[in-house]
Amino acid sequence: MYYKQSIILFGFALPAIVCAAVVGVAFSLKNKAAASFEAKRSQFKSYEMNVVTAQNLERDVSTKRAHTERWMTMLEKETASELSAQLRQIAEIVPSKEFQLTAQERSNSKAGFGSASAQNSTQFRMSFRGTFRSLQRAFLELETRMPQLQLDDLKIDPGTNSPNSLNVSVSYTAWER
C-alpha cells in the first residue's frame, strides 16, 4: 500500500503518456510523409505532362525548321534592296499598264508598329497606280515573298486618269534581325 501511488504514477500513467506521445509523433510523421508523397506524385505527373508537351512541340517545330531557316535568311538580307528587287520581279509578272510604282521612300526613324517594339525595324512608304485586280495581286505577291513586312497604313483613292485606275499609298514596317 505504501507504493500504490508510485506504482500508478510510474507504472501506468507515465508509460501511458509516453506511449501517447510516441503514437502522436508517429501519426504526425505518417501524415507528413503522406502529404510529401502526394506532392511529389503530383509534381511527377506534371513533369510527365511537360515532357510529353515538349516532345510534341519539338516534333511540330522540327517540321517547320526549314521554314524557320528560310525566314532567318530573309531577315538577314538588307531590307531596302530586297524590297526593290521583289518589286521589280512583281512588275514583270503584272502588266505594266495595270501596275506602276509611283513613289518609294524609306524612313530612317522608327514609326508605325516599330516604334512600340524593341525589335529592329524599318519603315517604308510606297505609292502605286493600277487596277484593283493588279494591285491586289501585287500586294499578295509582295507580302508572300516578304513575310517580315507588316502593313501599317493603306490609303486607296480613285485614279484621276482612268475610271478603272486606283492610287494606293501604303506604309509597311519591315522587321529586321
Image (cartoon, rainbow, N blue to C red):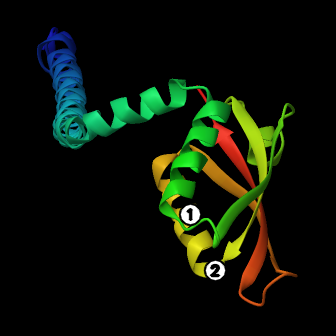
In the figure, residue 82 lies in which quadrant? top right
**Residue 71: x %, y % from top left:** 42, 35
Q: Residue at x 32, y 39 (%)?
A: 67
Residue 86, placed above or below residue 92 = above
User: Of helix, strand and loop, which one carries label 2?
Assistant: helix
Disc number at residue 138?
Answer: 1
Quadrant showing the C terminus? top right
Tag 1: amino acid = Ala
State whether residue 141 is above or below residue 14: below
Task: Measure the alpha-carbon separation of dots 1 and 2.
Answer: 10 Å
Numbered mark located on residue 68 in the image? none
The residue positioned 88% from the left and 82% from the top of the image is: 160
* Quarter placement of the N terminus: top left
Q: Residue 107 location, x and y as percent?
A: 84, 37
| Number of residues whose C-alpha sits closer than 10 Å to that of mark 2, classed few (under 14), some (14–19) or many (20 or more) | some
- Decide which of 141, 154 is in the foreground and name it: 141
Residue 132 image label? 2
Q: Position of residue 25 (x, y in %)?
A: 23, 22
Q: Residues within 10 Å of mark 1 (few under 14, many from 20)?
A: many
Please tell me which residue is depicted at 15% across the width and 9% down the height of the picture.
3
Q: In this image, 140 relative to 104: left or right? A: left
> Outermost residue toward the front?
97
Depicted 71 relative to depicted 9: above or below: below
**Is 102 on the left or on the right of 9, as rendered?**
right
Q: Amino acid at mark 2?
A: Phe
Residue 75 in view here: yes
Who comes first in sequence, dot 1 or dot 2? 2
